Image (cartoon, helix red, strand yellow):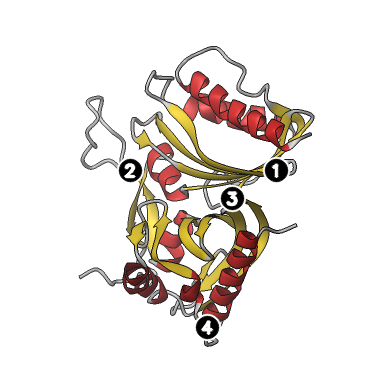
Amino acid sequence: MATASEDMVSSFILCMDQLLKGAHSDPWQFLAEEAVIEVIGTTPISGVYRGRQEIVSLLVATAMGRIACGSVTVLDSLGEGQDVGVFVLLKLTTPEGRIYNAQGDPAGCWFGTSNGKIIEIRCFPDTTQVETQLFGYGFVPNPPRAANGTHMRGAT
Amino acid sequence: MSTPDVGSVVRRFFELNVRALRGEAVDLFAILHEDLVWTMTGSTPVARTYNGLQEFKQIIGRALMTRFAPPHPSFGLYLRRIVVSGNKAAVIARGHGASAHGHPYNNHYFFFMDVKDGKISRVLESCDGSLVWQSVYDHHLEPSGRDAHADAT
């Protein structure tokens, strides 16, 4: 049986899904004013965002600039007390038509709740695809290194 | 199996990892079920589903030996958060290590783990795949050229 926190997280993700599909939706109503979101890694959207205002004006603004539409659904959810672990299916399409997560991999997300609000979200997206699909970067092999650890000039 | 036992099994998995990463001769795979199904999500060379402990040991065991730096007293894989329900656990973990190329490898992990017969039988894993490419596979990022997003100012 789902906990109250799991139900709230599920409602939040449903609202996110509606927003990604272009419907009028306000998922941020579920966030506490002092909520913290962490996106793992070193991508352009990675980092720790503190407070609803910073979340919306930095994280959401940056991400939505790279997203034309998308969808997110809960695949599996596990709650205990105020904490909830979730695997979601997140698919996104960029303004150029590139698809994030065409293969349909699950992505992990951790939620902390308190007093009926979400106070913490830790997101584990496919950071490879965030770089390649959302932001158009490619992963390129480093040139061979010399014995002293420096990159060898002219090496291919 | 009762809920406290599931938490103990999962904690034991991380304890064994820390000891192995620091060079202690422990059997890292002893806590994994023979019928293990381990799915590494994402877009890295090792992202796929491994069916059975033997397959997991063969491929991931070898990768651990060849793609990562030798054990070091400072290395570890640390359980940070856990929720348990029934025979399942959701876990956040942090790693501290280095790749065979000498790059730092301090990854973030999110796991769903199922426990059966006192062992971990199913794992669904998310981690920072970009770090895997850059640290373990010695790659770097460049604009791809195919209508690359040129928002950098």
Q: Looking at the image, which residue is at 66% across and 56% down? A: A77
Q: Amino acid at mark 3?
A: Thr
**Can you identify the residue that label 3 sits on?**
B41
Q: Is residue B120 left or right of residue B80?
A: right
Comparing B85 with B139, the one in front is B85
State the SS at label 2.
loop
**Can you identify the residue that label 2 sits on?**
A142
Cβ–Cβ below 8 Å for labels 3 and 2? no
Between disc 3 and disc 4, the foreground one is: 4
Q: CA distance from mark 3 to mark 4?
A: 29 Å
Q: CA distance from mark 2 to mark 1?
A: 40 Å
Q: Looking at the image, which residue is at 39% across and 37% down? A: B106
Q: Looking at the image, which residue is at 75% across and 57% down? A: A1
Q: Looking at the image, which residue is at 42% across and 56% down? A: A39
Q: Amino acid at mark 4?
A: Ser
**Can you identify the residue that label 4 sits on?**
A25
State the SS at label 4.
loop
Q: Is residue A22 left or right of residue A142?
A: right
